[in-house]
Image (cartoon, rainbow, N blue to C red):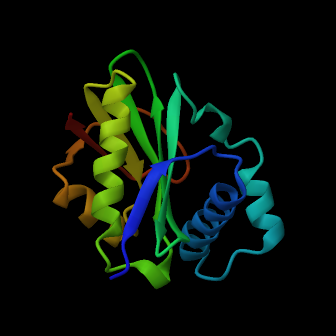
Amino acid sequence: MTEWNLAPEAVESGDAYALRRAYYGDVAGSYWQRPATDAEIDEGLAGDGAERLVPPTGQFVVGRYGGEPAACGGVLMLDAERAELTRVFVRPAFRGRKGAGLLMELLEHEARVLGARRMVLNTRLDLLAARALYVRHGYEEIPAYCSGPYMDIWYGKEL
Protein backbone atom coordinates (compact mmCIF):
# COMPACT_ATOMS: atom_id res chain seq x y z
CA MET A 1 0.00 0.00 0.00
CA THR A 2 1.34 3.43 -0.93
CA GLU A 3 1.66 5.80 1.99
CA TRP A 4 2.16 9.48 2.71
CA ASN A 5 5.35 10.67 4.35
CA LEU A 6 5.27 14.28 5.52
CA ALA A 7 8.08 16.15 7.24
CA PRO A 8 9.61 19.60 7.60
CA GLU A 9 11.99 20.40 4.77
CA ALA A 10 14.13 23.35 3.75
CA VAL A 11 12.05 25.66 1.59
CA GLU A 12 14.94 25.93 -0.89
CA SER A 13 15.34 22.17 -1.42
CA GLY A 14 14.73 21.01 -4.98
CA ASP A 15 11.47 19.24 -4.14
CA ALA A 16 10.19 22.12 -1.99
CA TYR A 17 10.97 24.64 -4.72
CA ALA A 18 9.26 22.50 -7.37
CA LEU A 19 6.17 22.20 -5.17
CA ARG A 20 6.14 25.96 -4.53
CA ARG A 21 6.28 26.52 -8.30
CA ALA A 22 3.42 24.05 -8.84
CA TYR A 23 1.41 25.75 -6.07
CA TYR A 24 1.87 29.20 -7.57
CA GLY A 25 1.08 27.93 -11.06
CA ASP A 26 -2.09 26.28 -9.79
CA VAL A 27 -3.51 29.21 -7.82
CA ALA A 28 -2.44 31.87 -10.35
CA GLY A 29 -3.73 29.81 -13.26
CA SER A 30 -7.10 29.33 -11.61
CA TYR A 31 -7.31 33.08 -10.94
CA TRP A 32 -6.34 34.03 -14.49
CA GLN A 33 -8.37 31.14 -15.95
CA ARG A 34 -5.38 30.08 -18.04
CA PRO A 35 -2.08 28.34 -17.35
CA ALA A 36 0.53 30.57 -15.71
CA THR A 37 3.73 30.95 -17.72
CA ASP A 38 7.16 30.11 -16.32
CA ALA A 39 7.98 33.84 -16.33
CA GLU A 40 4.82 34.63 -14.34
CA ILE A 41 5.64 31.91 -11.83
CA ASP A 42 9.21 33.24 -11.50
CA GLU A 43 7.85 36.73 -10.90
CA GLY A 44 5.33 35.48 -8.34
CA LEU A 45 7.96 33.60 -6.37
CA ALA A 46 10.48 36.46 -6.42
CA GLY A 47 10.44 38.12 -3.02
CA ASP A 48 7.52 36.01 -1.76
CA GLY A 49 9.00 35.77 1.75
CA ALA A 50 9.44 32.00 1.69
CA GLU A 51 12.83 32.41 3.37
CA ARG A 52 10.92 33.16 6.62
CA LEU A 53 9.42 29.65 6.64
CA VAL A 54 12.19 28.37 8.89
CA PRO A 55 12.29 28.19 12.69
CA PRO A 56 11.82 30.32 14.71
CA THR A 57 9.76 32.43 12.27
CA GLY A 58 8.02 29.57 10.49
CA GLN A 59 8.22 26.08 9.05
CA PHE A 60 7.79 24.46 5.63
CA VAL A 61 6.55 20.92 5.14
CA VAL A 62 6.80 18.60 2.13
CA GLY A 63 4.57 15.58 1.66
CA ARG A 64 5.58 12.61 -0.43
CA TYR A 65 3.25 9.93 -1.69
CA GLY A 66 5.06 6.72 -2.52
CA GLY A 67 8.27 8.74 -2.36
CA GLU A 68 7.13 11.29 -4.97
CA PRO A 69 6.87 14.97 -3.94
CA ALA A 70 3.13 15.55 -3.83
CA ALA A 71 2.18 18.22 -1.28
CA CYS A 72 3.48 21.18 0.66
CA GLY A 73 2.50 23.87 3.10
CA GLY A 74 3.93 26.36 5.51
CA VAL A 75 3.30 28.21 8.72
CA LEU A 76 4.55 31.71 9.41
CA MET A 77 4.59 33.21 12.89
CA LEU A 78 2.80 36.57 12.83
CA ASP A 79 3.41 37.29 16.50
CA ALA A 80 4.23 35.35 19.67
CA GLU A 81 1.00 33.34 19.66
CA ARG A 82 -0.44 33.51 16.15
CA ALA A 83 0.69 31.63 13.05
CA GLU A 84 -0.49 31.98 9.47
CA LEU A 85 -1.17 28.92 7.33
CA THR A 86 0.28 29.44 3.85
CA ARG A 87 1.08 27.69 0.57
CA VAL A 88 -1.11 24.65 1.31
CA PHE A 89 -1.05 22.55 -1.84
CA VAL A 90 -1.56 18.99 -3.04
CA ARG A 91 -0.64 18.26 -6.65
CA PRO A 92 -3.81 17.43 -8.63
CA ALA A 93 -2.67 13.85 -9.36
CA PHE A 94 -2.50 13.15 -5.61
CA ARG A 95 -5.75 14.74 -4.47
CA GLY A 96 -8.38 12.55 -2.89
CA ARG A 97 -5.78 10.35 -1.15
CA LYS A 98 -6.11 11.91 2.33
CA GLY A 99 -2.85 13.87 2.06
CA ALA A 100 -4.47 17.25 2.64
CA GLY A 101 -5.78 16.19 6.05
CA LEU A 102 -2.41 14.80 7.09
CA LEU A 103 -0.75 17.98 5.85
CA MET A 104 -3.11 20.16 7.89
CA GLU A 105 -2.46 18.09 11.03
CA LEU A 106 1.31 18.37 10.66
CA LEU A 107 1.21 22.10 9.90
CA GLU A 108 -0.89 22.71 13.01
CA HIS A 109 1.57 20.62 15.04
CA GLU A 110 4.52 22.62 13.66
CA ALA A 111 2.74 25.87 14.54
CA ARG A 112 2.26 24.68 18.12
CA VAL A 113 5.95 23.71 18.32
CA LEU A 114 6.78 27.30 17.31
CA GLY A 115 4.55 28.60 20.12
CA ALA A 116 1.35 29.38 18.25
CA ARG A 117 -1.95 29.10 20.06
CA ARG A 118 -4.01 30.25 17.08
CA MET A 119 -3.76 29.64 13.34
CA VAL A 120 -5.12 32.13 10.79
CA LEU A 121 -5.21 32.19 7.00
CA ASN A 122 -6.53 34.13 4.07
CA THR A 123 -7.70 32.86 0.72
CA ARG A 124 -9.81 33.66 -2.30
CA LEU A 125 -13.54 33.01 -2.57
CA ASP A 126 -13.08 31.00 -5.78
CA LEU A 127 -10.79 28.42 -4.12
CA LEU A 128 -13.74 26.31 -3.02
CA ALA A 129 -11.84 23.07 -2.36
CA ALA A 130 -9.32 24.88 -0.16
CA ARG A 131 -12.07 26.65 1.77
CA ALA A 132 -13.88 23.34 2.29
CA LEU A 133 -10.65 21.77 3.58
CA TYR A 134 -10.19 24.54 6.14
CA VAL A 135 -13.78 24.33 7.35
CA ARG A 136 -13.51 20.51 7.66
CA HIS A 137 -10.52 21.08 9.92
CA GLY A 138 -12.35 23.43 12.26
CA TYR A 139 -11.48 26.82 10.79
CA GLU A 140 -14.13 29.51 11.03
CA GLU A 141 -14.49 32.79 9.19
CA ILE A 142 -12.89 35.71 11.04
CA PRO A 143 -12.50 39.44 10.42
CA ALA A 144 -9.68 40.42 8.08
CA TYR A 145 -6.28 40.52 9.82
CA CYS A 146 -4.40 41.67 6.67
CA SER A 147 -5.18 42.95 3.19
CA GLY A 148 -4.02 42.26 -0.30
CA PRO A 149 -5.21 41.89 -3.87
CA TYR A 150 -5.89 38.12 -3.65
CA MET A 151 -7.49 38.03 -0.22
CA ASP A 152 -11.25 37.67 -0.06
CA ILE A 153 -11.93 35.68 3.10
CA TRP A 154 -10.10 35.00 6.36
CA TYR A 155 -10.26 32.00 8.68
CA GLY A 156 -8.96 31.19 12.14
CA LYS A 157 -8.75 28.34 14.62
CA GLU A 158 -7.56 27.92 18.19
CA LEU A 159 -4.82 25.31 18.31
Can residue 93 be seen in the rendering of this structure?
A: yes
Give the farthest residue toward the right.
Answer: 39
Position above or below: 79 against 112: above
- Residue at 19% from the left image edge and 54% from the top image edge: 137
In this view, the residue farthest toward the front is 1
Residue 155's quadrant in the figure? top left
98 lies left or right of 88? left
Where's residue 19, x and y in %?
61, 63
In the image, farthest residue toward the top = 80
Position of residue 2 measured from the top left corner of the image (x, y, whole percent): 37, 79
**Where's the N terminus, which quadrant?**
bottom left
Identify which residue, 141 or 8, lies in the foreground.
Answer: 8
What's the residue at 32%, 78% (across, down)?
97
Query: In front: 17, or 138?
Result: 17
Task: Tell me how many marks there are.
Answer: 0
Q: Nearer the viewer, residue 100 or 134?
A: 100
Residue 11 lies, with reference to residue 103, above or below; the image says above
Q: Position of residue 154 (x, y in %)?
A: 33, 45
Front one among 42 and 33: 42
Please report the residue visible at 83 percent of the width from the left and 67 percent of the height from the top. Answer: 39
Considering the image in quadrants, where does the C terminus appear?
top left
Q: Is residue 3 left or right of residue 22?
A: left
Image location of residue 84, percent across then percent down: 41, 37
Above or below for 1 versus 100:
below
Q: Is residue 144 visible?
A: no
**Is 101 left or right of 147, judged from the image as shown?**
left
